[in-house]
Amino acid sequence: MDGSGGNGRSRSSNTTQAWPVSAVPASWTAPAASWQGIAPRLAASPWWRGVAAVSAGALPALAFPAPSLWWLAYVALVPWMLLARSAPTPRRAALDGWLGGLGFMLSVHHWLLPSLHVFTVVIAALLGALWAPWGRLVRRLLGGTPTRGQAAAALVAVPSAWLMVELVRSWQGLGGPWGLIGSSQWQVQPALRVASVGGVWLVSLLVVTVNTAITVLLVARSARTPAVAGLLVTATVTTVSWAWAPRPEPDGPVRVAVVQPGPIGGADSGEKRFDREEELTRGLAGRGVDLVVWGESSVGFDFSQRPDLARRIAALSREVGADILVNVDARRVSPGGAPGIFKSSVLVGPDGLTGQRYDKMRLVPFGEYIPARALLGWATSVGKAAGEDRVSGTRQVVMDTRSARDSDLRIGPLVCFESAFPDMTRRLTRDGAQVLLAQSSTSTFQHSWAPEQHASLAAVRAAETGRPMVHATLTGVSAVYGPDGSRVGPWLGTSASAARVYEVPTAHGTTLYVRFGDWPVHAAVTVLALLGASEAVRQFRRRTAAPHVRPARTAHASPARPWH
């Protein structure tokens, strides 16, 4: 606790002594005395502290869809940081960081519980451990009464350490970059402008910096200057990004149709879904669309086994006057000769298959394959984990389409949660994609926060790259965003079964993020490296400055060393 807390208690004590004891009703003093006895016990209880840490870590999830309380992200980490800084020991601070990380991962991914059951908690606990060093760092820099130097160090080190956690857990094998704190700002235009400069990473840095500054303002009056400076730097970066960051130059719009068949079940759901998609696509004839996009797993049969389906789609393309991008989820023989299940974006034109195909590269852990199946294969017995590993593709593809206006349109397809990876859309943009596309299906999680969370990611990817992005799903939410990340037209919700045409604005030019990549991550690594070096030097100086005291020799034995 800082000195101001002690002073507050002293004033309260003096005020109470001014009242004669006999003048205070017993009904007033009894509850107060009872609470004074309970509160310290609750604070000292490791169980209640653990519950508080999990709850504090879960709070930021409300900033994401569906609640989408974006403003909460700027204060949601404060309770967690206050708890970690008050830990009695560094080990307890690390535990507070771990339990908070467990709460955060579990709340952001709670919609996985019906599919993975208890394994969701196991995964959340494993990933939550990434926040243990972060919690310890918060205590190291903000514990007790921080000095101005400690506060200034915290304002750069704490956000940098948070970013390292986000970077590590963004590895595809650990679940990918779902729930990055910067992604919660998907509908805030100033934040999207910041994303065009440094990607979602820079937005995350600024959000955590604001949380850190507020924490400093609450716990250290003497360190208010660095805290206010941190807030001013955040505001300045946002303002400069808004005013001077390069903006992609607008081109003419293209008309993209999204076909969403809606939930279809039953033993022959694959055939029924295809029939519904065919019906909806036929209704687009005469509307001058440039491209038609179906969702993930929209075709459940390999075209080599069902050439009739390829002919039906080609007939639709001729009728509508535009190429159709479908997604095939089926078993086929790979180029190497081994059979396997692929998820592939396939472009079909008026003359049939165009030969342009993209095989999904980054598969969903446990949903589409099980990491270290020999060790973790038991997950299939407690949930709906993948019974067979899908086969991943080897490279990204930019496709050339022919529209109803006989103009070329270059598209960059992604499949499902690949839209969460900033590097993939950046690569497609550098390779010349004019429109980014994500074919998705969240039908398993239809009545959860997952569909809206997934659809919101496309807004951040569009802002980062300066390219419009189309998010097309089987069962909703389908959405389209312009080159600045702003929404184009209404969403197709989870109850919709429809085909909707969007006037998608295109643009050319390069954002700073596409040009320079993940530079905020490199800056964060540099900050932490300098902090580590400074700490090492400080420890070395402390050891060398301490006087060397020779052990005392005694003539007689002592209880501690009876043999002397």
Image (cartoon, rainbow, N blue to C red):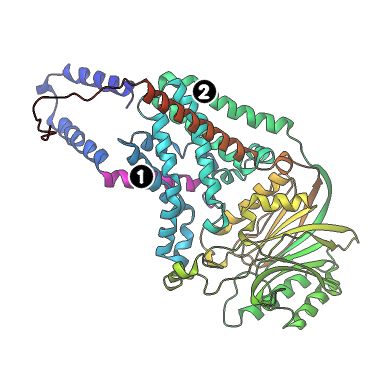
Of 426 and 451, the residue lying toward us:
426
Residue closer to the observer: 225 or 499:
225
Asked if the stretch drawn in magenta spans residue 64, the answer is yes
Residue pictured at 80% horizontal, 62% vertical: 291
Q: Residue at x 38, y 48 (%)?
A: 99
Is the magenta region chiefly helix, strand or loop?
helix
State left or right for residue 97 relative to residue 433.
left
| Among the two numbered marks 2 and 1 on one chain, the one whose residue lies closer to the N terminus | 1
Residue 68 in view here: no
Residue 351 sits in quarter: bottom right
Q: Is residue 174 visible?
A: yes
Taking the spot 48% from the left edge, 48% from the top edge, the residue there is: 61
Q: Nearer the viewer, residue 212 or 335?
A: 335
- Type of the residue with mark 1: Leu
Q: Position of residue 424 (x, y in %)?
A: 68, 53
Query: From the viewer's perspective, is 1 left or right of 448?
Result: left
Front of the two marks 2 and 1: 1
Residue 522 point in image, percent of width and height: 61, 38
Q: Which residues are magenta?
A: 46-66
Element marked by disc 1: helix
Q: Is residue 361 above or below residue 164?
A: below
Query: How far is disc 2 from disc 1 in space, using C-alphas?
Result: 30 Å
Q: Quadrant of the N terminus?
A: top left
Question: How many numbered circles are shown?
Answer: 2
Residue 161: give its label. Answer: none
Residue under label 1: 95
In which quadrant of the rendered image does the C terminus lie? top left
Crowding around mark 1 (Cα neighbors within 10 Å: few <14, some 14 to 19, many 20+) is: many
Residue carrying label 2: 228
Please, what is the three-letter code of the amino acid marked with disc 2?
Val
Residue 174: image location, x then y, percent: 52, 56
